[in-house]
Amino acid sequence: MTDSRQGTTPISGVVITLDEADNIEACLASLAQVCSELIVVDSGSSDATLARARAMGARVVEQPYLGDGPQKNVGPALASHRWVLSLDADERLTEQAVTAIRALALSDDGPDGYALRRRNFIGSRWVRACGWYPDYCIRLFDRDRTAFSDTRQHASVQATRTVRLDADLEHYSFADLGELFTKAGGRFSRRAAKIMYLKGRRVNAWSPWLHGSNAFMRKYLFQRGFTAGVDGLSVALSAALNAYLKYAKLLEYQRDAKVREAEDFERIW
């Protein structure tokens, strides 16, 4: 079966969402350049995400959040096509990526996954230090041979025969520096702490400081954040904040029954 938007094999585009009304149209428009099917797996949006996704021609599947990997595997399992291109709602294909994907001769005896370099942005600023570039991510894969890992946080496609494409996608994860810190200090660290607690992970009073310090050193020195000015320093500080609070919150769950009882461990997002 052929498709004019892609070499010889049709592709299903999949996105998971929660209140992504500001992002979903641009994401789906990006996918539509190479995909003949669009699937949005939503975990309870209260904004216009679903209406806008349907208006873009996407098939919408409503699924309470299962965790990162399990949630990202819902769409591929329901897709009409074997090859799947999975993007986050705040990611976009560049023209370079569209051209590279269209040129691929996808087959069942070749690579089972293709990785793209990811340009991570704060506002409109592309941050190339701190491990934020090239940041290769497998986004195009054969669902019959591979899938996302069954982990609830930071899942990745477990392809074994991969090719890195000479092309980028863009990731607009933080609107500004304020959001960089509020996400690190808020839902990112809380979600990670919940997941660790549910897995039985336990820490001591030194853990928050040690992990926070290590995160800063890694980003600012070893991954050359110092070459990226204020943005590089901010990324390093936010990584330190996220790591510190992640372990501090886990320690709090261990020690404080009142805090633990007030927390909803069924809601991870």
Image (cartoon, grey):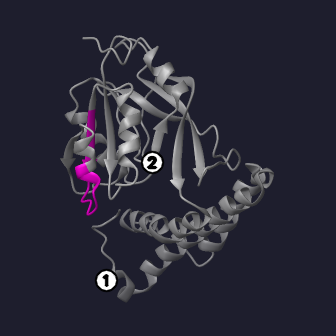
Q: Position of residue 11 (x, y in %)?
A: 32, 24
Q: Is residue 51 left or right of residue 207?
A: left
Mark 2 crowdedness (10 Å alpha carbons): few <14, some 14-19, many ≥20: some
* Residue contact between numbered discs 2 and 1, judged by CB atoms under 8 Å: no
Kind of residue at disc 1: Glu
Relative depth, front residue between 121 and 157:
121
Relative depth, front residue between 238 and 47:
47
Q: Is residue 245 left or right of residue 101?
A: right
Q: Position of residue 30 (x, y in %)?
A: 41, 34
Residue 47 in magenta? yes
Disc 1 secondary structure class: helix
The correct choice, above or below, for 153 with respect to 117 in the image is: below
Q: Residue at x 34, y 10 (%)?
A: 8
Which of the labelled discs sits on residue 261, or is there none?
Answer: 1
Instruction: State the image quarter where residue 33 is shown.
Output: top left
The correct choice, above or below, for 105 with respect to 72 in the image is: above
Question: Which residues fall within the magenta stretch?
Answer: 38-51
Q: Position of residue 120 (x, y in %)?
A: 58, 46
Q: Residue at x 37, y 53 (%)?
A: 152
